[in-house]
Image (cartoon, rainbow, N blue to C red):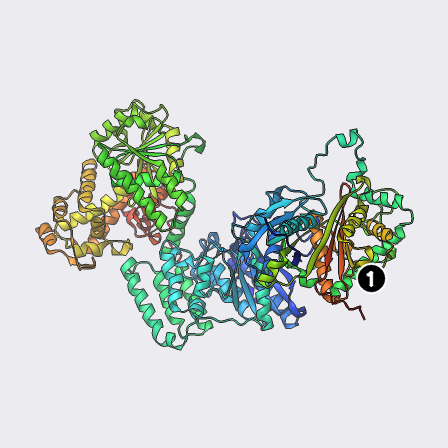
């Protein structure tokens, strides 16, 4: 019988996130190269990790074709120079791809199947627009299993505004503005850069180097946000300003059993407490993190008040607000997304889950007064995912 | 605006370069640590990987102007360093050969040298550190971009780093001969500048270049540029110190340098003689680099390059290079490749050494079943065993994997029953060189073969058409003449008889390419191309000694050709018996133009011409050999004989072209370069015959119009 183990998050890094499309910085960069460069960067800053001890590589992507096809975990491992003995596979849960890579491999570690594992995700939405080449079963519509609007994420966000009239456009815009400002401050204070792996980028006018997220808009104003079009409905509430954009990027994390981390002298940045995924109506997928968080808290035997730091994926401002309202947390609660979120940095679908973890881990180190943190996100087709982490730096003292 | 004035110096060059595929210098700023900026220059010609970036006059002027701007920015404190890299897979593949071939005067040639120094030299004078990130192929001037910079990094998977100039009859004249020895030491520099180019233009891998000290740091391809930028950042910040273990020290300059040059000169003289100018010019420059400064070194390069670039040998070398690079890819007279029949099983008739070498080559390259046959089981077993031993040797040298070794061995079988050839769609014979034997062997095997199987003969001296005289389907027979050693020599003469049909000819051409051989189509005439030319030279050489000219005088006579060996060395290499046979067959075919030599048969009985020491080194002519040929009464001077040989060759080549043995003079030259090792500086043979006047003397015209010679 394999022995059951505690799971730790040893380290995580990501590429800077680019703006998708022809004008984006990664237009000439392959998706697999993005994840490979992230893996190389992660292993380089953890030189004590014996590469041949890595038992699995799981890489998520939503659109698994072309340079995101061919069972990415395996191809990325080979391209990153890992020994051929290291296996790998691809994973898909749309936006929660990387999060699912982590929970899947963590489960394997907990079961004793793996000692060390690499979990991450990549999405090049420029090369692989969302839903491109998808072929939804006609039964979805003919049997009214889901409405046509369920496949349009912007429309599902509008639906949240419908369901919770108190979630106004103004609250969404204000939340979005704060995200931009917090991200700008995060960069200003050097909080985000340490976990970014620079990526060389080719353009028709020569090579350059991506060193920061491309889509940041620190100059955003409330007035500017108020004037934006609502592309999903006439006189709607969801705009390009209070939603995450279309982005390219990759994230990767190193997970280990607590025992292996100790054996190899690796410092754990976070310890896994519990995780859960939950389904909701696809038409209003943005509220998914509410039930998944309830479920994860329950499994952990914790309540929402035990959570000291939140990293919530900002697919849409309204969708984050729906969770905050549900748990009675203020829109501007300082525990939430301290250094900004996807509205500012971008949301390359299947890679975002690990970005949340990277930022939570960095905050844990600064906050020994916090014991637990939550990473959570909504998922297309009506799901939510939540992972609760414990801070190894927790010292039991209240913050002064 | 000083650079506009300066660039006027190069106006003539630039005017001649209006159709240049320009490699642009794109600049992007890259943030590095402590708020500093590195200006990253990308060399990119905007074409895909099939058109490497090259350096022509317009390119160099743009590069120079770009560096001028960066120098100004450095002066203003905007940038802390400058780095240069290339588009994917290429730093730069060197000077644009289509441009240097059209140099119209020595003065313009000198401008080309000076422009390179002018542009590349700016990398050493920017006011901030300069870096070149060698991300891919870096040849000639491409590598010299790197050498002119302060620091270099290299991609571990770079396929080729080289200074091939000497191979082409010039010298690395944009800093290479001065900068390289002062960077990596004289012995390493000799290897890169002289030794490798003469080893059939061998190139260094990224790892080898790093080990020699050409680059200061090496990184894996996966994040090469990211790592190079980070490394440059460290150098600029002062946290990374660069050590150069191979840089020459005082002792090397005082003692080793001249000795190394001396050793290299001797080796060069032994290997290729004194005819080729460029290696000796390079040696001269490398020697002087010991104690001259950069400016003096570059000035010497300007002079040397101007001289060579406007000379005959460079013109002939570029011609030869283009034949080898381009004409081999589109063989003259080849039928449509689509007509070729698939070759899925190969039969080899004969199990001797030559046949076994064929079988090995076919199984390695085509990876299809290969069956060998011979008169009896013992010979067949011996042949199969030989092939298996050779495969084992490849395995031992790690040229193939154990799986591949198993695969290849399993594909090779032997039989004494020709009925086992039924499935073969390509059958090649390498049996005794006798018409009757070959005719019978083919007629015998044909009864077992399918209607569409192709038959190939490796005959070197018989008529292919006559070999097929007893075939029911002579249209499926083609000559397929390899050169020894089969695995090494790149040429196959594909002999097209009047009966050979297009499908057969196409199959032969496509098969040759799959064997990694270059094929030239010839008609079914005695000696085809290479042996006919060699027989001409060797016949003249033997006739000269037969009529009283000393061996030494004969050897002297062909020295100005710069051939890889003298006629008698060549005779010993191919074997005196074989040589005598070649002369006999050519004499029989063309009795009025080709000599036979009874003395050569006697020398063959003696077994050698030269006297050798215990290491096999020639010490002189064997006394018994001298005795055998003694008695001639009409000796020639070396000069008289050389003129005879030149005229004889001009006549023979002219006749071959008149009777369409091959499509063009280019094909004769290609055959001689690939099949007989004739040097680039001769351009094969026809450019040489034109420029020494032999063509005019013999047929009052030239092979090339205009003739291929320098502008001096």
Subunit bearing disc 1: A
Q: Quadrant of residue A339?
A: bottom right
* Residue at the image position 31 percent from the left and 68 percent from the top: B262
**Nearer-the-camera pick, B334 or A92:** A92
Is B77 drawn above or below residue B328 in the view shown? below
Residue designated by label 1: A334
- The residue most toward the front is A1
**Nearer-the-camera pick, B699 or B212:** B212
Residue B458 position, x and y percent, is 28, 36
* Residue at the image position 43 percent from the left and 62 percent from the top: B172
Residue A360 position, x and y percent, is 73, 59
Residue B150 position, x and y percent, is 52, 69
Q: Is residue B626 left or right of residue A374?
A: left
| Element carrying mark 1 | loop
**Nearer-the-camera pick, B23 or B569:** B569
Q: Quadrant of residue B250?
A: bottom left
The quarter in which the C terminus of chain B is drawn is bottom left
């Amino acid at each position: 019988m394999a022995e059951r183990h505690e799971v730790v998050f040893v380290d995580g890094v990501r590429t800077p996130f680019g703006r998708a499309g022809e004008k984006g910085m990664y237009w000439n960069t392959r998706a697999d190269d993005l994840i490979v460069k992230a893996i190389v960067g992660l292993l380089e800053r953890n030189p004590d990790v014996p590469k041949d001890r890595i038992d699995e590589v799981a890489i998520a992507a939503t659109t698994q074709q072309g340079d995101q096809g061919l069972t990415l975990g395996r191809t990325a491992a080979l391209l990153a120079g890992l020994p051929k003995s290291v296996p790998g596979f691809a994973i898909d849960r749309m936006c929660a791809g990387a999060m699912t890579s982590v929970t899947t491999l963590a489960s394997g570690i907990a079961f004793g199947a793996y000692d060390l594992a690499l979990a991450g995700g990549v999405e090049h939405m420029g090369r692989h627009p969302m839903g491109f080449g998808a072929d939804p079963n006609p039964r979805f519509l003919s049997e009214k299993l889901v409405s046509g609007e369920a496949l349009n994420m912007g429309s599902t966000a509008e639906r949240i505004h419908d369901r919770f009239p108190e979630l106004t456009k103004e609250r969404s815009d204000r939340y979005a503005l704060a995200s931009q400002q917090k991200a700008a401050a995060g960069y200003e204070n050097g909080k985000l850069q340490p976990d970014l792996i620079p990526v060389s980028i080719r353009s028709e006018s020569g090579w350059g180097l991506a060193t920061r997220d491309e889509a940041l808009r620190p100059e955003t104003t409330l007035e500017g946000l108020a004037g934006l079009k609502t592309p999903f409905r006439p006189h709607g509430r969801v705009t390009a300003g209070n939603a995450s954009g279309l982005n390219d990027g990759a994230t990767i994390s190193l997970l280990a059993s607590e025992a292996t981390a100790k054996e190899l002298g690796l410092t754990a940045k976070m310890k896994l407490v519990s995780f859960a995924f939950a389904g909701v109506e696809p038409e209003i997928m943005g509220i998914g993190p509410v039930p998944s968080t309830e479920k994860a808290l329950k499994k952990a035997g914790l309540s929402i008040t035990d959570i000291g730091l939140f990293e919530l994926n900002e697919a849409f401002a309204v969708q984050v607000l729906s969770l905050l309202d549900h748990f009675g947390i203020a829109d501007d609660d300082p525990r939430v997304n301290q250094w900004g979120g996807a509205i500012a940095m971008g949301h390359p679908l299947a890679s975002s889950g690990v970005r949340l973890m990277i930022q939570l881990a960095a905050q844990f180190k600064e906050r020994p007064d916090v014991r637990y943190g939550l990473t959570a996100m909504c998922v297309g087709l009506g799901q939510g995912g939540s992972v609760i982490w414990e801070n190894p730096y927790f010292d039991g003292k209240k913050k002064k | 605006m000083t650079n506009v004035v300066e660039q006027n110096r190069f106006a003539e060059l630039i005017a001649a370069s209006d159709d240049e595929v320009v490699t642009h210098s794109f600049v992007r700023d890259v943030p590095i640590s402590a708020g500093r900026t590195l200006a990253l220059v990308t060399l990119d010609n905007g074409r895909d990987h099939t058109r490497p970036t090259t350096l022509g006059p317009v390119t160099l002027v743009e590069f120079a102007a770009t560096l001028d701007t960066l120098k100004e920015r450095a002066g203003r404190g905007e940038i802390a360093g400058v780095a240069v890299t290339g588009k994917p897979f290429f730093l730069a593949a060197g000077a644009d050969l289509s441009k240097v071939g059209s140099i119209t005067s020595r003065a313009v040639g000198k401008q080309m040298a000076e422009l390179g120094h002018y542009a590349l030299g700016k990398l050493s004078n920017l006011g901030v550190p300069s870096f070149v990130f060698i991300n891919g192929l870096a040849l000639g001037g491409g590598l010299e971009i790197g050498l002119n910079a302060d620091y270099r990094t290299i991609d571990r998977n770079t396929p080729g780093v080289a200074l091939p100039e000497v191979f082409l009859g010039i010298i690395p004249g944009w800093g290479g001969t001065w900068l390289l020895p002062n960077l990596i030491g004289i012995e390493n520099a000799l290897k890169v500048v002289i030794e490798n180019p003469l080893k059939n233009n061998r190139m260094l891998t990224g790892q080898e270049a790093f080990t020699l000290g050409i680059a200061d740091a090496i990184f894996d391809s996966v994040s090469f540029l990211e790592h190079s930028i980070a490394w440059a950042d460290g150098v600029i910040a002062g946290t990374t110190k660069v050590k150069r273990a191979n840089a020459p020290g005082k002792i090397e300059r005082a003692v080793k340098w001249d000795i190394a040059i001396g050793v290299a000169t001797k080796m060069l003289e032994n290997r290729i003689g004194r005819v080729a100018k460029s290696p000796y010019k390079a040696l001269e420059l490398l020697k002087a680099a010991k104690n001259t400064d950069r400016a003096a070194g570059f000035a010497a390069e300007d002079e040397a390059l101007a001289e060579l670039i406007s000379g005959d040998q460079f013109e002939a070398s570029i011609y030869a290079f283009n034949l080898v690079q381009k004409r081999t890819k589109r063989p003259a007279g080849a039928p449509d490749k689509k007509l070729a029949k698939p070759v899925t099983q190969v039969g080899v008739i004969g199990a001797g050494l030559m046949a076994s070498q064929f079988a090995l080559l076919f199984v390695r390259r085509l990876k299809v079943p290969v069956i060998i046959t011979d008169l009896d089981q013992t010979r067949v077993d011996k042949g199969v065993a030989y092939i298996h031993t050779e495969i084992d040797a490849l395995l031992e040298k790690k040229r193939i994997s154990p799986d591949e070794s198993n695969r290849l061995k399993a594909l090779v079988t032997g039989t004494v029953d020709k009925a086992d050839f039924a499935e073969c769609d390509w059958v090649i014979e390498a049996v005794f060189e006798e018409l009757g034997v070959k005719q019978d062997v083919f007629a015998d095997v044909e009864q077992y073969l399918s209607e569409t199987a192709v038959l190939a003969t490796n005959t070197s001296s018989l008529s292919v058409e006559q070999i097929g005289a007893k075939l029911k389907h002579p249209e499926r027979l083609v000559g397929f003449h390899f050169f020894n050693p089969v695995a090494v020599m790149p040429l196959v003469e594909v002999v097209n008889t009047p009966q050979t049909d297009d499908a057969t000819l196409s199959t032969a051409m496509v098969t040759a390419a799959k064997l990694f051989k270059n094929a030239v189509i010839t008609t079914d005439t005695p000696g085809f191309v290479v042996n006919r030319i060699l027989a001409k030279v060797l016949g003249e050489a033997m006739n000269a000694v037969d009529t009283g000219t000393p061996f030494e005088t004969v050897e002297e006579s062909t020295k100005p050709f710069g051939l890889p060996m003298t006629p008698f060395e060549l005779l010993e290499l191919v074997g005196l018996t074989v040589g005598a046979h070649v002369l006999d067959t050519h004499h029989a075919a063309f009795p009025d133009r080709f000599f036979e030599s009874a003395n050569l048969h006697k020398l063959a009985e003696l077994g050698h011409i030269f006297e050798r020491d215990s290491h096999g080194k020639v010490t002189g002519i064997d006394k018994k050999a001298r005795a055998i040929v003694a008695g001639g009464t009409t000796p020639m001077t070396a000069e008289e004989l050389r003129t005879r040989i030149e005229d004889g060759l001009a006549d023979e080549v002219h006749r071959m072209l008149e009777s369409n043995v091959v499509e063009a003079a280019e094909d004769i030259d290609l055959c001689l370069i690939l099949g007989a090792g004739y040097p680039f500086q001769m351009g094969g043979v026809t450019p040489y015959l034109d420029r020494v006047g032999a063509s005019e003397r013999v047929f009052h015209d030239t092979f090339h119009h205009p003739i291929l010679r320098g502008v001096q």
